[in-house]
Image (spheres, coloured by chain):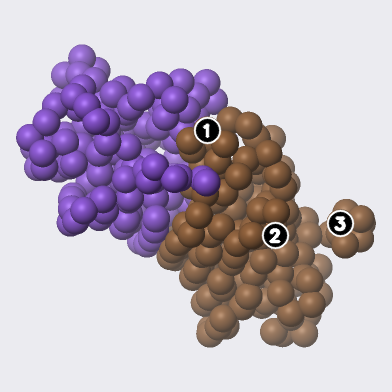
Chain colours: A purple, B brown
Amino acid sequence: MKIRMKEMKAIQDYYPEELSYCYGCGRLNKFGHHIKSYWNGEQTIAHFTPEPYHIAVPGYVYGGLIASLIDCHGTGTAALASYRNENREPDTLPPFRFVTASLCVDYFKPTPLGVELELVGNVIEIKGKKVISEITVSANGVVTAKGKVIAIQIPENFGL
Amino acid sequence: MKIRMKEMKAIQDYYPEELSYCYGCGRLNKFGHHIKSYWNGEQTIAHFTPEPYHIAVPGYVYGGLIASLIDCHGTGTAALASYRNENREPDTLPPFRFVTASLCVDYFKPTPLGVELELVGNVIEIKGKKVISEITVSANGVVTAKGKVIAIQIPENFGL
């Protein structure tokens, strides 16, 4: 699975250049996390190994990082789902790119540092410009956190 | 206000050394954000200026960072509120230290990069080992995001 993924392009690799500087998932942000989201059957998937300094209390991952991973895999899942919903490939125009309207994370148990985390996304709803997804975070095969992301297609007047 | 705060100790400055490595607010994490939370009357307050690379889309702050700031100011607010609730100073024992059970953030509008953000916390409920707070994030005096943090006192069996 991993080897195949490295050969594949993630949805973030298709984002337009000017929208590829996100600290969480922008391929052009030198300091960022470079989260990459893929389809895995009907679910989406991403992996990330926290750095030793991404610590909360000794031995465990910082909750803000977990929220960040869920956030970006949620907007990535929204983009993946939107192309599939239109039977379009992600290199076709117009591009789908989302921002987060709402992010909720429940932390079930401490997430151990030092292992690769797996994020799995399920698309709950696609309605107009809104995509809702649920994202689980697992370490060593155990789900430690679960998030819900409401993503909105970037409006033309964003930031105006 | 700012000058007075710099002379004051933040709640995070009282955390026990072994619990002071949090990426968001640990004073001993070399790479972290060093969020510092204070009382401001009946509210709590913290300030943070994002780095240029904490970008979402050009000109605006990454939502994962905003969630991270809310997370740490929420647990800091929980600790502040717990000491005040017991009429204790934060340098008295036993120390209060919290982890996040749940974090929800609504993003109302894009948060501009390049300015200092202000986080204001209101304590909603203190019940047993649980403290619920609401945190607003403002830039240039405009609220751009609002979060709710359910913080739980670190259990003795945390991570076991």
Secondary element at image label 2 = loop
Residue holding disc 3:
B2
Real-space Cα distance between discs 2 and 1?
A: 21 Å
Task: Judge the density around disc 1: few (<14), some (14-19), many (≥20) Cα neighbours within 10 Å.
Answer: some
Q: Nearer the viewer, mark 2 or mark 3?
A: 2
Residue holding disc 1:
B58
Look at 54% across and 25% down and name the residue there. A31
Task: Judge the density around disc 3: few (<14), some (14-19), many (≥20) Cα neighbours within 10 Å.
Answer: few
Q: Nearer the viewer, mark 3 or mark 1?
A: 1
**Camera-side residue of B72 and B2:** B2
Residue holding disc 2:
B141
Residue A105: x percent and y percent?
A: 38, 59
Look at 32% across and 55% down and name the residue there. A150
Real-space Cα distance between discs 2 and 3?
A: 15 Å
Task: Judge the density around disc 2: few (<14), some (14-19), many (≥20) Cα neighbours within 10 Å.
Answer: few
Look at 51% across and 45% down and name the residue there. A159
Looking at the image, residue A43 sits to the left or right of residue A56; the answer is left
Residue B95, placed above or below residue A144: below
Q: Which mark is residue A87?
A: none
